Image: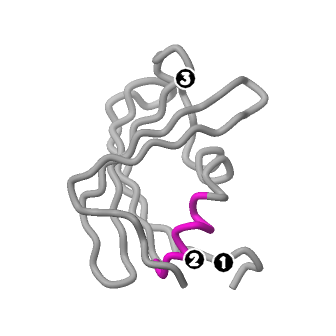
């Protein structure tokens, strides 16, 4: 297990290549408590446009980042986001996800 690089209040940026092109994630670390981390998430396209990504596809896209979080010692992730596009604009997402290692540990 490696020491995680996060501080509460800082921003983390990730970029993932998808079939539809690059998808970028910008997350603010809201809370770290033991093996728990809470991130407020913004998802956007390469040109800065808003991208409509549902929760399940989002979790598949973020697979490697979730494994990284697990390797840093986290076992639970809460994602918070405000939907501004798609089927339910204005809906607030607040999902807690158990983290698994690369082997599904």
Q: Nearer the viewer, residue 51 or 11?
A: 11
Q: Report the span colored magenta.
A: 65-74
Residue that badge 1 annotates: 101
Using the image, determine if residue 18 lies above or below residue 102: above
State whether residue 92 is above or below residue 24.
below
Q: What residue is drawn where x is 38% and y is 26%?
A: 84
Quadrant of the frame with the C terminus: bottom right
Look at mark 3 in the image and give the residue it sits on: 45
**Residue located farthest toward the left when viewing the structure as drawn:** 9
Based on the displayed image, in which of its 4 quarters is residue 5 positioned?
Answer: bottom left
Q: Nearer the viewer, residue 42 or 85?
A: 42
Residue highlighted by disc 2:
71
Helix, strand or loop for the magenta stretch, by majority: helix
Q: Position of residue 3 (x, y in %)?
A: 43, 78
User: Closer to the N terminus: mark 1 or mark 3?
Assistant: 3
**What residue is shown at x 66% (from left), y 58% (from top)?**
64
Q: Does 54 sit left or right of 89 as displayed?
A: right
Counting residues from the N terminus, which is met first, the one under dot 3 or under dot 2? 3
């Amino acid at each position: 297990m490696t020491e995680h690089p996060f501080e509460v209040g800082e921003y983390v940026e990730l970029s993932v290549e998808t079939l539809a092109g690059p998808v970028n994630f910008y997350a603010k670390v809201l809370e770290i408590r033991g093996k728990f981390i809470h991130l407020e998430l913004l998802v956007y396209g390469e040109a800065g446009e808003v991208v409509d990504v549902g929760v399940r596809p989002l979790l598949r896209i973020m697979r490697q980042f979730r494994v990284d979080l697990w390797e840093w010692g986290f076992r639970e992730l809460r994602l918070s986001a405000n939907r501004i596009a798609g089927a339910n604009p204005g809906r607030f997402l607040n999902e807690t996800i158990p983290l698994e290692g690369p082997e599904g540990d």
